[in-house]
Amino acid sequence: MQPPKTHNHIELAFEIDSDLYELYIALLSQEGIEYFLEEETKLLAYLPESEWSTEKEEAIKALLQETFGSEPHFAATFMADRNWNAEWEAHLQPVEISDRFLIVQHQKEYAVKPGQIVIAINPKMSFGTGYHATTRLMMRQMEELDLDDKKIMDIGTGTGVLAIAARKLGNKNPILAFDNNAWAAENAVENVAENDVTDIQVELLDAEEELVANLEEGYDLILANINKNVLDRILPVIRRHAPTAQVLLSGVLVYDEPWLKKLLKRIRYTNVKTIYEDEWLSALIEPAN
Ligand SMILES: C[S@@+](CC[C@H](N)C(=O)[O-])C[C@H]1O[C@@H](n2cnc3c(N)ncnc32)[C@H](O)[C@@H]1O
């Protein structure tokens, strides 16, 4: 893995009713914001300093105004690199994903059911704590699959949770897991070590720039919990350069299911199974003959 870039972030604080948190997260994720902290009286959203600009601010305002009909108010604060581990861990609790999976944090107590797989995730600013429906949907789809001999790529690995889950479900091949956020890639390396799993190669890579060369390795299953805009650009590339691979995706809102169906038809994927939680969906797709 390359050395991480800066960890400076911009924090956006939204003082809104907690009933609106999920909807805000869904909307902001359309603008590529992936990291959130839900406090009692406000929702905090984080993006790398390098991605913050006047245009981004205007785009977020326009999106919220379009949805809610009034001018949105939020504060943007520069956050220098600091010990996020401690801050995030203080907020997190174990999350039961299913009868099969429990996500826990380092040094916190938890109760595990017989046969349940425990994954320890100590997130920094990385997405993939189990607190988000899309992570849970991906894991629930994965537990239904026979992953033993699949060669897996995990795009947008965040904390590394899906790659770790694949290994703990019995997958035996090397896994390539990558993220374009330095913080996430670094955190995924730590979580892979914490869970004592091997042969997960974590890289700092951008799916929109470096996918083709990596797909040449030949993958059977591509995990992609990202967002509509990135999926829109990378699914055609995956279809062309990994013509036999199944793709398990999430990060798509239920309202965008018509868009997804149209895209899958155009690039000739068959939908194997779609599952839903809150306003999110996860779809397992495979190339049509
Ligand atoms: C919704 S999170 C998913 C994290 C984790 N895989 C999970 O399921 O919980 C999406 C991740 O994709 C990463 N990401 C977004 N665009 C990307 C791109 N173009 N290339 C690589 N990673 C990207 C984000 O940094 C973020 O960590």
Image (cartoon, helix red, strand yellow):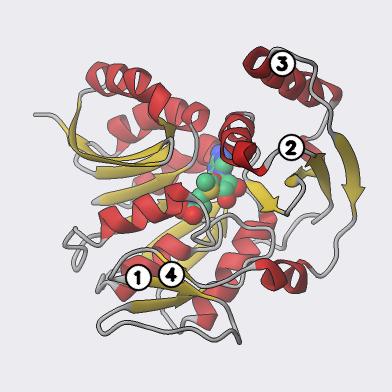
Distance, label 2 to label 3, CA atoms, is 14 Å
- In the picture shown, does residue 197 fall above or below 7? below
Q: Which of marks 2 and 1 is nearer the N terminus?
A: 2
Q: Which of marks 3 and 1 is nearer the N terminus?
A: 3
Callout 1: SS = strand
Q: Earlier in the sequence, mark 4 or mark 3?
A: 3
Q: Position of residue 266 (x, y in %)?
A: 26, 16
Q: Residue 16 carries which label?
A: 2
Q: In this view, does 39 lie to the left or right of 32?
A: right
**Foreground residue among 105 and 155:** 105
- In the picture shown, does residue 49 fall above or below 185? above
Q: Position of residue 47 (x, y in %)?
A: 74, 43
Q: What amino acid is labelled 4 in the image?
A: Ile
Q: Position of residue 125 (x, y in %)?
A: 69, 58
**Foreground residue among 234 and 80:** 80
Distance, label 4 to label 1, CA atoms, is 19 Å
Disc 3 target residue:
65
- Asked whether residue 156 appears in the rendered view, the answer is no
